[in-house]
Image: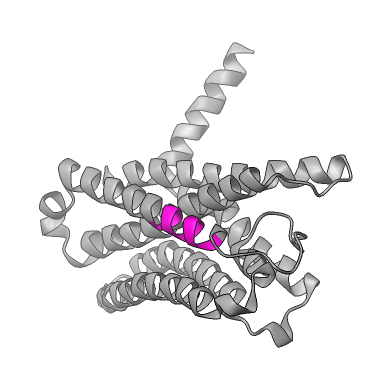
């Protein structure tokens, strides 16, 4: 099924984004250090942007999957065939790679004139931009503008799709059917909103309201929480996946 194919890709992007930031932060905490090399910082920025952009693109595609399955069920096999799913997943990964490459190259081409200490648990682009020269304001604006346009375009598509989905769900005569559809869609929409709102606020908030505790909270909310919640929302709430996990656990207990 297309949803399971996209879940596999989403799991890989979630694993990649968590692995890019959390292990290094845990290592620094255990060894009471905050050091990271310049090349390591650049690599962390690239891979984090790559995986987090892929995740948002996949969430947008999965929203389209829900839209087709609920609003156009008779065309599901045609619109979401195996070739179409492969093309959409490849487009998500490829566009995320190009976005991360351009964004990282543009960020690290800015001269750093305010030291080399980042007030964050990983190399975050907004924190790096704070260290750049004030003469680079125009380029910093374009970095933020590009991210905003990309995120806003996906957000508009998601909102439009969910408006159509909710209109179709409200026409379901069965109250149990409506409840099942809403319980499936609303958690996904909540995670997308949390991810997008905190990420954009971290990038676009004015310096006057910036503080270490606020920056840390925002970074955790958009970089750690959504990848951690996605398995719960998409896997544990799926009856077929729950049944498969149950069979796996039963077989393991029988062997041991």
| Magenta region | 99-107
**Can you say whether 195 is above or below 108 in the image?**
below
In front here: 247 or 167? 167
Residue under the image location 47 percent in, 46 percent down: 13
**Can you say whether 54 is above or below 86 in the image?**
below
Q: Give x and y (percent) for residue 161.
A: 29, 72
Instruction: Place residue 194 in its image quadrant.
Output: bottom right
Q: Is residue 104 magenta?
A: yes
**Can you say whether 33 is above or below 217 in the image?**
above
Q: Give x and y (percent) for residue 16.
A: 53, 43
**Can you say whether 54 is above or below 19 in the image?**
below
Q: Is residue 94 magenta?
A: no
In front here: 196 or 36? 36
In the displayed structure image, the side of residue 182 where residue 224 appears, left or right: right
Instruction: Place residue 123 in its image quadrant.
Output: bottom right
In the displayed structure image, the side of residue 70 where residue 182 appears, left or right: right
Furthest toward the right, the residue is 32
Residue 18 shows in the view: no
Query: Split into 4 quadrants, where in the image is the C terminus?
Result: top right
In front here: 240 or 226? 226
In the displayed structure image, the side of residue 64 where residue 129 appears, left or right: right
Residue under the image location 59 percent in, 79 percent down: 135
Residue 68 shows in the view: yes
Q: Which secondary structure type mostly characterizes the magenta part of the structure? A: helix
């Amino acid at each position: 099924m297309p949803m399971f194919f996209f879940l596999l890709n989403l799991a890989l992007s979630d694993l990649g984004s968590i692995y890019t930031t959390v292990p290094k932060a845990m290592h620094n905490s255990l060894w009471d250090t905050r050091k990271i090399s310049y090349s390591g910082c650049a690599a962390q920025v690239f891979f984090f942007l790559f995986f987090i952009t892929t995740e948002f693109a996949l969430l947008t595609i999965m929203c389209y999957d829900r839209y087709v399955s609920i609003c156009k069920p008779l065309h599901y096999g045609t619109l979401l065939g195996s070739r179409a799913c492969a093309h959409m997943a490849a487009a998500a990964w490829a566009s995320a790679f190009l976005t991360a490459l351009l964004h990282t190259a543009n960020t690290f081409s800015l001269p750093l004139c305010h030291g080399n200490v980042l007030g964050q648990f990983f190399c975050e682009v907004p924190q790096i931009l704070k260290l750049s020269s004030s003469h680079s304001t125009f380029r910093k604006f374009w970095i933020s503008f590009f991210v905003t346009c990309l995120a806003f375009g996906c957000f508009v598509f998601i909102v439009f799709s969910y408006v159509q989905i909710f209109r179709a769900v409200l026409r379901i005569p069965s109250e149990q059917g409506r409840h099942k559809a809403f319980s499936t869609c609303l958690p996904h929409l909540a995670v997308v909103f949390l991810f997008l709102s905190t990420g954009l606020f971290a990038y676009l908030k004015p310096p006057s309201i910036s503080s270490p505790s606020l920056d840390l909270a925002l970074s955790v909310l958009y970089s750690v929480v959504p990848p951690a919640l996605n398995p719960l929302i998409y896997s544990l709430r799926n009856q077929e996946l729950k049944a498969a996990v149950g069979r796996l656990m039963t077989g393991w207990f029988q062997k041991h």
